[in-house]
Image (tube, rainbow, N blue to C red):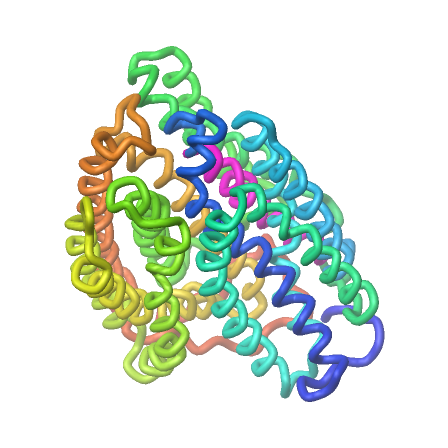
Amino acid sequence: MDLTTGQPVRYSTAAGRWVLFATVLGSSLAFIDSTVVNIALPEIGRDLGADAAGLQWTVNGYALSLAALVLLGGSLGDRYGRKRIFLVGVAWFALASLLCGFSPNIETLIFARILQGIGGALLTPGALAILEASFTNEDRGKAIGAWSGLGGIGGAIGPFLGGWLVDIGDWRYIFLINVPLAALVIWVGAKHVPESRNPAAARNIDYVGVITGALGLAGLTYGFTAWPVDGPGSPVVLISLAVGVAALVTFVLYERRSAHPMLPVRIFANKAFSGANLVTFVVYAANGGVFFLFVINLQVVSGYSPLASGIALLPTTAIMLVLSARAGGLSQRIGPRIPMTVGPLICAVALVLMSRIGPDANYWTDVLPSVIIFGLGLSTLVAPLTATALGALEDSYAGIASGVNNAVARAAGLLAVAVLPLAAGLGGGSLTDAAQLQPVYQHTMMICAGLMVGGAVLAFLLVPTRLPVHPPARTFCDPGAPPVQSKTAETVA
């Protein structure tokens, strides 16, 4: 049971609208900033003289700290108060955005992006937890649905806004605009959002889990990013990869033995949960490669402006807004296996078409068809995938399941940005040179198409035809206790 100050709010009241406004705008800051930066990468590279590795780390610095610390952010909110940690994260994010906007060189920008990711890890898990704790039982579904829909609109606006800001002024504006928006969130949140916490939350912070998890992701990311320039035999590459693997092994071993783990490893004994997260890792790795290179290719190779490349993917977002809820309803009727198998295959077709986008590409004939098909594939896939990852475990593990799936998706995108340009043959080349980028982009899209096909195969083999029906959630749950296994999840193949 949560402890919440004040009475639960109703969706139709002014108090409910204020809570929804603060959580939507706050979480949108972190979500939008993970996408609009890609629009500005060519301008950042030219302005700061950054090479390919520098641009990769501009994306990965943010993704690394966010992926490594998002589980910690959720546990801190449970312990110290969701509102408090949410507002601390928003303030932190704003200060880091200010540093991003005034960065004199690529090294400072990367450091500031890492700080941004820390702020995002503090505020991201708090938004849904605040909605869950603040609204009455009968209005909770409406609030979460509105948060999801409005967040999708924010995601659609983000690339357009980023391209427009780069076109009319400077790439630095995409960071500086966060500051007044964050100030608005803090004012509304402090005045209108009730505080809540979980009195059953573990009192000890899993420092070993935090450090080893972050070190593992950092080691692998740094090693693969340095590989194209330094070579596979470089001591820096070998040591980084070895440290990354050793840290992740230590993380798993420690979490298995910890009395209060940040990640209770026992939950992966559930076949449906493990399968959903494995599919998540593969398809979001593909997504990471697409969203990293697609808009860069449109600008550098095809000659599109930042604004035009920013709005090129709007049809994908629009299709997802219209169809995702319907796909979720279909998944409830027929089970998640078929949508999670068909969705990645549709995406693979789209990525094969995307690989053909080259110099002077026409938007209507070369870009739009692949973008529409990609939107149809993601719409078919995402809602069933999320529902399976959250619904495979009993209700008392909903927060942990959500955090794990979020971390898996972000880690997949992080590693994709580090590994895919290497796998596609970038070497020590430049992402802002059309002659060097075009073959790398084409090869990357084909690799991503292969990952989507792999995700479809995994979904067919590992995802059940029906999700289990769970007993009611316990009032207090022990994060280290094994989840209740449902025969549906274990026997339906």
State the residue in front, 314 or 69.
Answer: 314
Q: Locate the C terminus by quadrant.
A: bottom left
- At 33% from the left and 52% from the top, the residue drawn is 287
Q: Position of residue 393 (x, y in %)?
A: 47, 66
Residue 68 in the image, given as x and y percentages of width and height = 54, 41
As drawn, is 330 to the left or to the right of 364? right
Tell me the residue at 42%/63% (across/down).
389
Q: Nearer the viewer, residue 219 or 464?
A: 219
Q: Which residues make up the magenta segment?
A: 56-78
- The answer to whether residue 115 shows anywhere in this view is yes
Q: Nearer the viewer, residue 191 or 6?
A: 191
Residue at 58% of width from left, 62% of height from top? 399
Judge left or right: residue 136 versus residue 162. Answer: right
Residue 221 x, y percent position in the rendering: 42, 31
Please say whether residue 278 is visible from this viewpoint.
no
Tell whether position 437 is magenta.
Answer: no
Quadrant containing the N terminus is: bottom right
Q: How many marks?
A: 0
Corner quadrant of residue 116: top right
Q: Is residue 74 magenta?
A: yes
Q: Nearer the viewer, residue 196 or 105?
A: 105
Q: In this rendering, is residue 326 above or below 47?
A: below
The image shows residue 446, relative to residue 420, as above or below, that is below
In this rendering, the answer to whether 152 lies above or below 251 is below
Q: Residue at x 48, y 31 (%)?
A: 47
Q: Position of residue 233 (x, y in %)?
A: 30, 13
Q: Quadrant of residue 196?
A: bottom right
The chief SS type of the magenta part is: helix
Q: Is residue 265 left or right of residue 328?
A: right
